[in-house]
Structures are given as structure tokens and as C-alpha cells.
């Protein structure tokens, strides 16, 4: 069964020197696809270009919460970005293999200075676009799960989504799953101090989990300070399987089905 890295910033400069070779090594390990999240409008065409160079590389369109303060987000600017997004999606749909499979990464983060009201406005903007384009939503949520849950009850993403790099309690996880979200599991579970998140991923329904590296960030325990890479995805699957006392084959088969279901992959 193949692995799919559901969250990998493979377009980042950290990979410029050896991207193609690295991807071949990852494929040799069984990683046969990855999803590059959208960060800001200026990065979208590069994500699309990468997906044309590496056909196993899919992309999403969105504005990461950390980028909100770096770009214009007045109503006119947002209107223009939505228009840009629709052009890229039209172009992608008419290509022989569409590669834009999600909207995001959108989200909320209590560790940044951008006021939460402004972050919520942008989250709504993403949800409306995901619903308009019939696509799932990639969500980044740091210390904001309650706000996310409350907000998505008012404005639900109709085509599901994933809360990437989920960290939190089992109860919170189940609330998100009940709302139609998948949870992304990555290198966090390799850290002993992440006991709450490890306990959560040991118990949540396997049908609601996606694997991710979040490379180049989120290195595995023991590799702090080094570049993370999609080559580490099989190790994350192994750790996840050990955590649940299940075989890596069971985990991989199930997660692959989840990935296909959420992103409507063939
Ligand atoms: Zn990310």
C-alpha cells in the first residue's frame, strides 16, 4: 500500500537544491503522492508549476494564518485573490490530470499577533470558497480548537476537511471528527512529552486519520533542527501503528482509503 503525505511544504526553498532526487528516494520508500498547501497568493502559481513537474505532487490554494499580516487582506484584495483562485482552478480542471484538490491551509493560531477576529474572517473566506468550489478544507489550528469548532458549526465546510498536525484531547478530536474533519498525524507522536496527543491518536477511529510530515518543519524526535522530509512518512506510519498496536499494513491501507475519500483521488 502506498503512502500519501497529506501536508508537505515541498515547494519551500529548503528543497530547492535536491527536490527531484529527494522525491525519487521517497517514492522508492513507497511514498507515492503528496499535497502542497497554499500559503499566500504569490506562491500559488509555483505550487501549480511544481505539480506539473512532479505529477504525484498535488496542491491546495489558500492563505496560511501566519501570512495574513504580510499581505493585503482588505475586501478588494480578497475579492481579487478569489478571482485568481478561480482562474487557477479552471486551468487545472481543463488539464488532463487535475492537481488542485483542496482549499487551504486556512486557520487560526493563538501564537501570532494577528487579531483572532481577523483570522476568523479569513477562515470564513476559505470555507465559502471551499464550498463554492466543492473542495475540502485544510485547517491549521494552534490553541484554537474551541473557536474552530464553534465557528464551523455556524459556517460548515460542506466537503469536509483535515485539521493538520492535530494536537489535543480525545474529546476535542471526536468533536472535530463528528463535524466531518479528518485529523492529520505527523512527527508529534514521536515525542514522549506529547502524551495527550499520543493518547488521542491511539484511540480515534482509524477511518478519520491522514498521515503527514509537515516538512520541512516538524522533525521527528531526535532530529530537531534538521530538515524534515517526505522520506520520513513511512517512519511516521510505523510509529502510528505501534501506538495503536496494529500492523503498519492495516494503518497504511486504511489511511490510503481515507486520503482518496477526502481528496476524491482516483
Ligand atoms: Zn503547513
Image: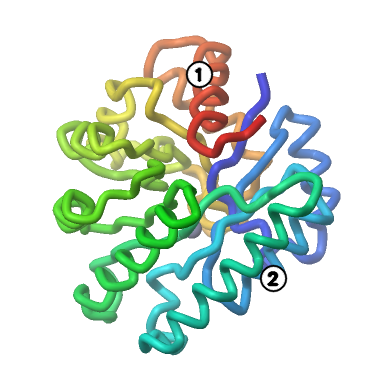
Helix, strand or loop status at disc 2: helix
Residue 193 screen position, x and y as percent:
29, 41
Q: Is residue 235 left or right of residue 209?
A: right
Helix, strand or loop status at disc 1: helix
Image-quadrant location for residue 68: bottom left
Frontmost of labels 1 and 2 is: 2
Q: Is residue 248 visible?
A: yes
Image-quadrant location for residue 44: bottom right
- Residue at image location 21% in from the left, 32% down from the top: 174
Residue 155 screen position, x and y as percent:
24, 55
Marks 1 and 2, Cα distance to the nearest angstrom? 32 Å
Colour basis: rainbow
Residue 81 screen position, x and y as percent:
51, 77
- The image quadrant where one finds the C terminus is top right
| Residue beneath disc 1 | 254
Is 160 or 43 nearer to us in this picture?
160
Q: Earlier in the sequence, mark 1 or mark 2?
A: 2
For disc 1, the neighbor class at 10 Å (few under 14, some 14 to 19, many from 20) is some
- The image quadrant where one finds the N terminus is top right
| Residue beneath disc 2 | 45
- Residue at image location 61% in from the left, 30% down from the top: 234
- Residue at image location 56% in from the left, 20% down from the top: 252
- Residue at image location 45% in from the left, 46% down from the top: 136
Amino acid at each position: 500500500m502506498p503512502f500519501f503525505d497529506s501536508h508537505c511544504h515541498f515547494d519551500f526553498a529548503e528543497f530547492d537544491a535536491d527536490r527531484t532526487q529527494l522525491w525519487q528516494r521517497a517514492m522508492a520508500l513507497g511514498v507515492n503522492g503528496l499535497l502542497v498547501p497554499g500559503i499566500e497568493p504569490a506562491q500559488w502559481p509555483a505550487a501549480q508549476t511544481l505539480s506539473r513537474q512532479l505529477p504525484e505532487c498535488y496542491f491546495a490554494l489558500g492563505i496560511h494564518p501566519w501570512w495574513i499580516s504580510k499581505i493585503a487582506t482588505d475586501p478588494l484584495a480578497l475579492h481579487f485573490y478569489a478571482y485568481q483562485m478561480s482562474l487557477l482552478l479552471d486551468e487545472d480542471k481543463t488539464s488532463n490530470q487535475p492537481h488542485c484538490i483542496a482549499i487551504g491551509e486556512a486557520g487560526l493560531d493563538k501564537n501570532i499577533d494577528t487579531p483572532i477576529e481577523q483570522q476568523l474572517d479569513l477562515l470564513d473566506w476559505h470555507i465559502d470558497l471551499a464550498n463554492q468550489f466543492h473542495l475540502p478544507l485544510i485547517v491549521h489550528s494552534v490553541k484554537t480548537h474551541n473557536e474552530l469548532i464553534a465557528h464551523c458549526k455556524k459556517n460548515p465546510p460542506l466537503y469536509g476537511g483535515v485539521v493538520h498536525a492535530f494536537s489535543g484531547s480525545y474529546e476535542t478530536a471526536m468533536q472535530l471528527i463528528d463535524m466531518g474533519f479528518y485529523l492529520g498525524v505527523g512527527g508529534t507522536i514521536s515525542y514522549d512529552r506529547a502524551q495527550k496527543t499520543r493518547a488521542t491518536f491511539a484511540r480515534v477511529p482509524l477511518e478519520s486519520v491522514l498521515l503527514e510530515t509537515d516538512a520541512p518543519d516538524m522533525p521527528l524526535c531526535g532530529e530537531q533542527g534538521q530538515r524534515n522530509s517526505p522520506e520520513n512518512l513511512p517512519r511516521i506510519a510505523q510509529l502510528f501503528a505501534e501506538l495503536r498496536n496494529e500492523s503498519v499494513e492495516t494503518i497504511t491501507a486504511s489511511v490510503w482509503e481515507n486520503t482518496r475519500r477526502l481528496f476524491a483521488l482516483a
